[in-house]
Amino acid sequence: MWVFPVTAAAISGALAAALGRSWMQTRRPNLLAWCLALSLFAIASLAAGAGMLIGWTTAWFRIYYLFGAVVNVPVLALGTIYLLAPRRVGHVCAVVVALGAVSAVFTVYSADLNVSTLHVSGIPSGRDVMPAGPRALSRYYSIAGSVVVVGGALWSAWRLARRRQGDLWRLARANVLIAVGTLVVAIGSIFARYGRGSVFAISLAVGALLMFRGFMTTRVPARR
């Protein structure tokens, strides 16, 4: 049902606005990256809702696929890098992510879609609509981004085990929440591949809430 992706879009949009306000107050680049990532979640969910409600077109599907399946996780990973690595490293990675996003836009919008597979009531399967090139790009981007997010959670937990510092414990908990939220969305995307769009939309909403909780945990001062 279209109500699920629209709800996911509303939740993601509201959380992105909250992160945007936090970034305006602190100017921390990790908050800006996460704000952008949740904005992409919202756009992809809204495109999915529009496709399910009024009928899929190539425009709706390209927006949904580009923002939801390709560029989102790398931007999310960029926030983890800014949180845990020196800022100059984050700036270099931001340039890489930006160039990757430009490449993704060209790849997705130049692909020849199988239009006949868009006439479904749920979310069309990417493997039925997209050719091999964009699907491979989606896998590479998602895997690389997920490794950074999950690896950041494990790394911060390892540092906690070594140093037993309160601030590191807070960052560890934050990254675990972000990693779990990312995995929830990734698992939901598997259902989307087989036409279970409602399950994917619910996973977007739940994953966004978990990630937002993790994002905001990074802002809470460590208690001695």
Image: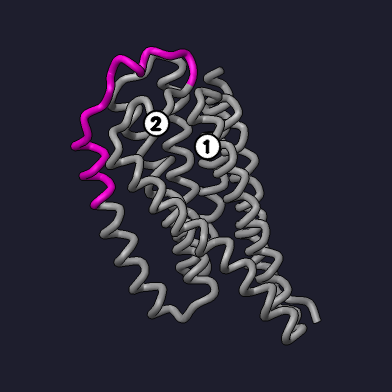
* Nearer the observer, 137 or 13: 137
**Residue placed at 62% from the left, 32% from the top?**
202
Q: Find out whether the residues at labels 1 and 2 contact each other: C-beta distance under 8 Å.
A: no
Q: Position of residue 113 (x, y in %)?
A: 26, 26
Whether residue 23 is visible here, answered yes or no, is no
For marks 1 and 2 on the same chain, the one whose residue lies earlier in the sequence: 2
Left or right side of 175 for 78? left
Is the N terminus in the top left, top right, bottom left or bottom right quadrant?
Answer: top right
**Residue placed at 49% from the left, 77% from the top?**
85
**Residue placed at 75% from the left, 80% from the top?**
161
Whether residue 7 is visible here, answered yes or no, is yes
Residue sitting farthest toward the bottom: 163
Q: Is residue 55 above or below residue 135?
A: above
- For disc 2, the marked residue is 126
Left or right side of 19 for 132? left
Part of the protein shown in magenta: 103-122
Q: Which label is found at residue 189?
A: 1
Mark 2, Cα crowd under 10 Å, few <14 / some 14-19 / many 20+, is: many
Left or right side of 167 for 103? left
Q: Is residue 154 magenta?
A: no
Left or right side of 60 for 106? left
